[in-house]
Amino acid sequence: MKKYLPWLVGTALVPIFSLSAFAQNNVEFSGDLRVGGVGFDRDERDGRNIDQSRLRLRARAGLEWTISDTYSAKVRYAARVHNTGNESAELKLYRALPPGSSSIHPGQSTLDEMYVQAEYGQWRHRVGRFQTNNLLMSVPAKSFSRTDSTGWDVSWTDGIHSRYTLPSGWHVNMIMEHNSKKGPTHIRRAPLGFDRSASRATYYVSLDHTQPDGLFLQRSVDVTVMPSALYYNGLQYDDQRDYIGFTGRLGLQWQLAGSARLVAGGELAWAPETPTWAALNLPGQGKADGFGYQLMLNVMDIRPGHSVGLIHGEADAGWLLSTDFVNNQSQTELRYSWDVMPGHQFQARVRQRDDVRRFVGAQRKRAETDVFVRYTISM
């Protein structure tokens, strides 16, 4: 930790001072620093028990240049580090994440935003590397379809993002995402693969309303299309099919006493074409189930700045798109959030995750309980 911490913090702070002279010339600095501790107790499928804890840190620093009333550009540096198990600390522009991972490895750093933006009328276009999310609005905010850089992770989207705002306040989002031959830039679970040229582009369209409107807090539907990315019988067989995922989410709110609000809702997900049970190393005949759901209940601003939320969700083995929900697992999470002051937030959680079906050859289902506390400073 001592080896990497000065380098990470120093790199994050350099833009503040070295470019402060440009701050009044349409260049704006933004950044955040997140630090905390994680612990988990896991019963592995092979009969082992693993009990570990570690400290984590993520630093991000970005510069946005407003070129004109229409055009702007942004670049952001991001790095993560643990107190153990760090890899090379060199800055590298990664084309893809490590296989099966939702983030670059501890000790690594990259540019997780590097794009040009055009905004005019009701349109906004981004080209390059950027962040994309479509979360169910909750204290433990999660998604079945699209999440970048959750928790201490660093991930991104490479491609083109266009957004059109309707007069009614609804947004239409359209993303064409590039997948490297080495893999995607956020989690896509096996047997999805991108080694063929036909699978290099992913298409995503959503219709969203995320501004509070009476009873409604959020309404959203989306579809993800991944041509020739699904290895139906497993990655070792040359049998590729299109993978398509549909999700919908709804959030409702009710005013309680004082500043408190009750927020409840849920998200549903479905993939019509899924891999076989055999391809997933699970017992069964034919195609795996492809549904997913989450339900959430929150009390926001119990006292000003203090909120608590509970979610429960489950992803069938054939749902392969979610960073937040592992396929073939159920998940329950309780999280507390405290907005200490503007730009400062403290959060704590406890989470339980369990396998739904036991894998072929496994001694038992995996079960894991994990906790974290973290503090985030944003500017």
Image: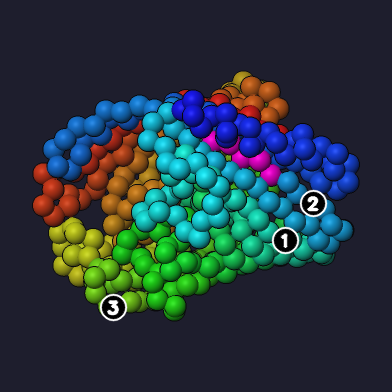
Q: Quadrant of residue 50?
A: top left
Question: Could you tell me what secondary structure mostly forms the magenta stretch?
Answer: strand
**Which mark is on residue 81?**
none
Q: What residue type is labelled 1?
A: Val
Residue at x 11% of width, y 44% of height? 363
Q: Give the range drawn in magenta.
A: 58-62
Nearest the camera: 162 or 31? 31
Q: What residue type is labelled 3?
A: Asp
SS at circle 3? loop
The residue pinned by badge 1 equals 116
Relative horizontal placement of residue 247, taking residue 377 as reference (left or right): left
The residue pinned by badge 2 equals 65
Q: Position of residue 81 (x, y in %)?
A: 48, 35
For the C terminus, the quadrant is top right
Q: Where is residue 88 in the image (x, y as percent from the top left)?
A: 45, 43
Q: What residue type is labelled 2?
A: Trp
Q: How far apart in space, not on screen, are marks 1 and 2 (Cα)?
A: 9 Å
Was residue 299 drawn as part of the magenta stretch in this picture? no
Which callout, 1 or 2, points at the residue further toward the start of the chain? 2
Residue at x 68% of width, y 30% of height? 343
The residue pinned by badge 3 equals 239
Nearest the camera: 35 or 3? 3
Let me know if residue 349 appears in the view: no
SS at circle 1? strand
Compared to residue 136, the image places residue 171 above or below, namely below
Which callout, 1 or 3, points at the residue further toward the start of the chain? 1
Let me know if residue 177 appears in the view: yes
